[in-house]
Amino acid sequence: MKPMRQKTTRAQGNKSISNALASKRKVSKNQVVFFDYRDERKLKRFINDQGKIIPRRITGLTAKEQNLLTHSVKWARFLAVIPYVADEYK
């Protein structure tokens, strides 16, 4: 008698992806999120080595928090607190 195969659904497949990305989360669930455009160290945690903003699925932020982050990073770039592009890519 053959062993029965378990049905794998699309949700189960996505669950493993979200678990893999959960270890990369930059902000804990209970932490109050406020992004100050003058806080260079905090903003650099959410920017990769090329200068791109890290996407929401990796940072673990909510849509509202990601929007606040994006506006803070863009404003900090405009005021020259952080660079638009890393030095290696200029």
Image: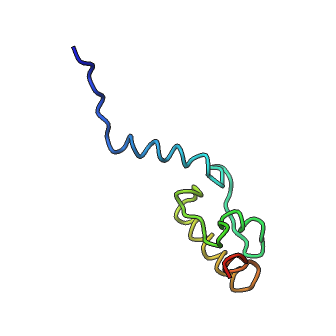
The N terminus is located in which quarter?
Answer: top left
- The answer to which of 85 and 17 lies nearer the viewer is 85
Q: Quadrant of residue 65?
A: bottom right
Q: In this view, does 62 lie to the left or right of 31?
A: left
Identified at 57% across, 47% down, the residue is 22
Identified at 69% across, 86% down, the residue is 78
- The image's colouring method is rainbow
Q: Quadrant of residue 9?
A: top left
Q: In this view, does 37 lie above or below 19?
A: below
In percent of width and height, residue 38 lies at 77, 75
The C terminus is located in which quarter?
Answer: bottom right
In percent of width and height, residue 63 lies at 52, 64
Q: Is residue 38 above or below residue 57?
A: below
Q: In which quarter of the image is residue 35?
A: bottom right
In percent of width and height, residue 18 lies at 49, 47
User: Number of numbered discs present?
Assistant: 0
Q: In this view, does 43 lie to the left or right of 7?
A: right
In percent of width and height, residue 76 lies at 71, 79
Identified at 60% across, 69% down, the residue is 53
Identified at 57% across, 55% down, the residue is 60
Single out the residue that lies furthest toward the top.
1
Q: In this view, does 16 lie above or below 35?
A: above
Q: In this view, does 16 lie above or below 39?
A: above
